[in-house]
Amino acid sequence: MSKIQQTAVNMAGVGFRKWAQALTKSKGTGISALLSGCRAASGGSKGSLPGSYPTTPEEKAAAAKKYNIRVEDYEPYPDKGEGFGDYPKLPDRSQHERDPWYKWDHPDLRRNWGEPMHWDFDMYIRNRVDTSPSPVDWISMCKQLFGFIGFMLFMFYIGEKFPSYQPVAPKQYPYNNLYLEKGGDPEKQPEEVKNYGI
Amino acid sequence: MADYREAPLATRPRTLDPNDYFNLSPEKRRADEERAALRANLKRQYQTQLNNPHRKELIEDPALTRWVYARSNPYPHFRPTFKTSLLGFACGVFPLFALYYIFKTDRVR
């Protein structure tokens, strides 16, 4: 192709692109230039989803605002590459501990609308893990449990060492130890077998 | 009850928590009030949407959306460190070979 024809083709290509961009008023190239340049107003805004670990104080403040937490309360998970991003580290408390008499928006979950959810929220629901204080303290619980288990193990061990059975003897048969059934002579008088004692 | 020791990972009863008695300060009070203000704001938003007579659709909870999104998209923030790769090996690679070995030897027997 001659140089003039090439430039003409280039200009045509450029012209089409510019036309498409003007049509959609978007600054993208390629497919995104042909799609609509406006986003829908429904749904969450772009900045409302979790992002990456915040490094500067401004990012921390923005993340705290996003999650509806006080800036002083907002503490992201330490950045160890475990996949948390900027999700806040809330106290590991189960939903069992929350006030049962307060008017929650969702009473079964004991949670208000918009409240930041713990990363392990589905573990801390009221059907599952319970972190509420135990009625008896830890030491006495340990003592009771391990005491019982230890006692049972000890007794079973003793039972293995000193087994006790019901007393048994060889089975006693009637009719002079079954003399006839065992093929004894019917004419002969068998010796009297006494299997009892009075 | 003075020597009550709570179970690890469980909480102490409120009445035995020393913070409730000793560390009270105006800053703590202010913090509680700020938290209450945030909570009241969210409550107001929710109640407005709930009692709106023209509302036909479900009330979308952005906190829930964020939680679901965070839980289902950990990979952009994943970085192979010593701990994570160790975990990955323990859960993904080791059982593979261990189970293969166990099944093979069990079947031969």
Image: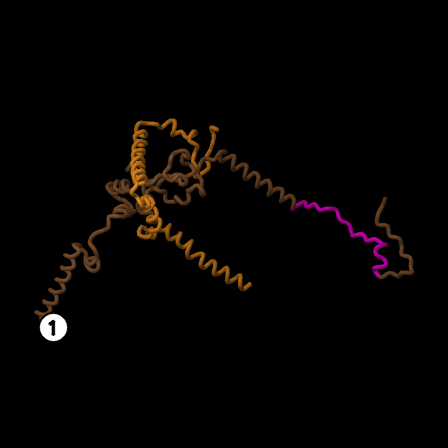
Please give the range of residues in magenta.
A160-182
Name the side, left or right, on which A198 lies relative to A131.
Answer: right
Say above or below: B72 vs B43: below
Nearer the observer, A96 or A52: A96
Identified at 70% across, 45% down, the residue is: A164
Q: Chain A is drawn in which colour?
A: brown
User: How far across and how far down the image is residue A57, in percent?
Assistant: 25, 40
User: How far across and how far down the image is residue A185, in percent?
Assistant: 89, 61
Nearer the observer, A174 or B85: A174
Q: Mark 1 points at which residue?
A: A1
Question: Around disc 1, counting alpha carbons within 10 Å, would you say few (fewer than 14), some (14 to 19), or many (20 or more)?
Answer: few
Prevailing secondary structure of the magenta residues: loop
Identified at 65% across, 44% down, the residue is: A159
Name the side, left or right, on which B99 lies relative to B71.
Answer: right
- Give the quarter of the image for residue B39: top left
Please say whether residue B51 is visible from this viewpoint.
Answer: yes
Q: Does the magenta stretch include residue A177?
A: yes
* Chain identifier of the residue bearing label 1 in the image: A
- The quarter of the picture where the C terminus of chain B appears is bottom right
Disc 1, SS = loop
Amino acid type, residue under disc 1 in the picture:
Met
Say above or below: A30 vs A63: below
Which residue is situated farthest in the left direction here? A4
Say above or below: B13 vs A7: above
Any idea which chain is the orange one in this picture? B
User: How far across and how far down the image is residue B58, in percent?
Assistant: 33, 45
- Give the quarter of the image for residue A76: top left
Number of labels in the image equals: 1
